[in-house]
Amino acid sequence: MRCVTAANQVFFSEAVLTAANECVGVLLGSLDPSMTIHCDMVITYGLDQLENCQTCGTDYIISVLNLLMLMWALSPTVFALLSKNLMIVHSDLAVHFPTIQYAVLYTLYSHCTRHDHFISSSLSSSSPPLFDGAVISTVTTATKKHFSIMLNLLGILLKKDNLNQDTRKLLMTWALEVAVLMKKSETYAPLFCLPSFHKFCKGLLANTLVEDVNICLQACSSLHALSSSLPDDLLQRCVDVCRVQLVHRGTRIRQAFGKLLKSIPLDVVLSNNNHTEIQEISLALRSHMSKAPSNTFHPQDFSDVISFILYGNSHRTGKDNWLERLFYSCQRLDKCDQSTIPRNLLKTDAIFWQWAIWEAAQFTVLSKLRTPLGRAQDTFQTIEGIIRSLAAHTLNPDQDVSQWTTADNDEGHVAKLVRTG
């Protein structure tokens, strides 16, 4: 402290003083809190440094504030206060006071970001070195468990269903930063064996099938960054999710999860027999098919489906997916149990097409083949022609399909029908 004071009197340098404050902070953090030696000198030094804040930048101000907090030995620490004492994982806080939860989490996120999420300190076995290359480290053994606590906290929060949307977006941004940082150095390899890391990844997987596209993409990006370090059980779960998202109606989702699937070892993909969501979809569709007709699928709906299959044209206008809008238009409030398909899976083309084809077939039977296509014989011949054309296309993908489809409004709809069929 005397050295810094003397240097300041000779030549003022914000960069030097910022580094000096961090160095003093390391020493203060290593002292026994019961020691009161030179207390007056420490306080005087801190106040002198605080006066310099008026003419310095943000980095210097933050270093001084950290220094002052160390001087007064806050108990609990800032990290403990934000991560534990304020109980930010409490469900009532998320439901009744979402703004407060967001504010506390953002403060904790900012605190962790400044310290590189405490990754380096989590690997320290004893007193950390004061210098790490040209940067002075502010890490102490007191922060050794911070990274594990932070991962555990993120894992718990990411699996909660009642989070505010802004809070979830913040957590996903935070998680992606942590995932990228963990892969920056091979020395971080021991961190992938932490139980809290497993919980963290479980939280990411819980967000891969949510309705918000951006949340899905961020969760996928985080898992892709970590894929080479994931254990087999988490990789198997990634395969389950990819199977569902590869038939998502959004191109960005399909591409992102296709990229994730490519990063998973082939033996893991081939040995996967879980099919959790696929089984759930199959059971939901079978349940729907076993029910009595709802009579909510009308001739116009039949025309929309057949018109698209035949010509690739949709009569329904709007920016939203026409098949999804058709599905919801056939639901009724007085038949709330009509759709047994989980809501978070209602973004996949395969589900909508299987539902639409079943409803169209059921409508055809109920109307005794008298449909907007014409009389019974006309309807039968048209449907037979569609099936024959699709079968021929699957056997010879290079054939000319212009004779039975134009696909003006939906590029590649033939391939889409083949895939979802």
Image: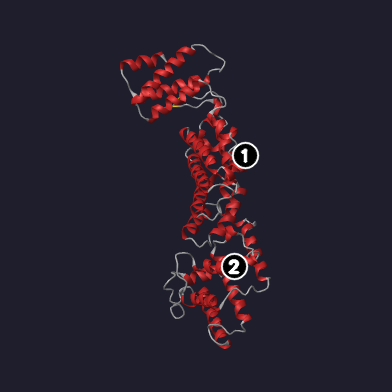
Q: Secondary structure at mark 2?
A: loop
Q: Earlier in the sequence, mark 2 or mark 1?
A: 1
- Residue 326 lies, in percent from the top left, at 53, 69
Residue 325 versus residue 146 in the image, above or below: below
Q: Give the position of the C terminus as an image quadrant.
A: bottom right
Which numbered dot is residue 195? 1
Name which quarter of the figure residue 295 lies in: bottom right
Crowding near pointer 1: few (<14 within 10 Å), some, many (20+)? few
Residue that appears at 40% across and 13% down: 2
Residue that appears at 49% across and 13% down: 39
Q: Is residue 338 visible?
A: no
Crowding near pointer 2: few (<14 within 10 Å), some, many (20+)? some
Residue that appears at 44% across and 81% down: 403
For badge 1, the amino acid type reads Pro
Report, in whole angstroms, how far the alpha carbon at label 2 lies from the one at label 1: 44 Å
| In the image: residue 251, left or right of residue 341 | left
Residue that appears at 52% across and 39% down: 105
Kindly give the residue lying farthest to the left in the view shown. 11
- Residue 318 lies, in percent from the top left, at 45, 67
Numbered marks: total: 2
Residue 117 versus residue 218 in the image, above or below: above
Q: Which residue is mark 2?
A: 331
Q: Nearer the viewer, residue 347 or 193?
A: 347
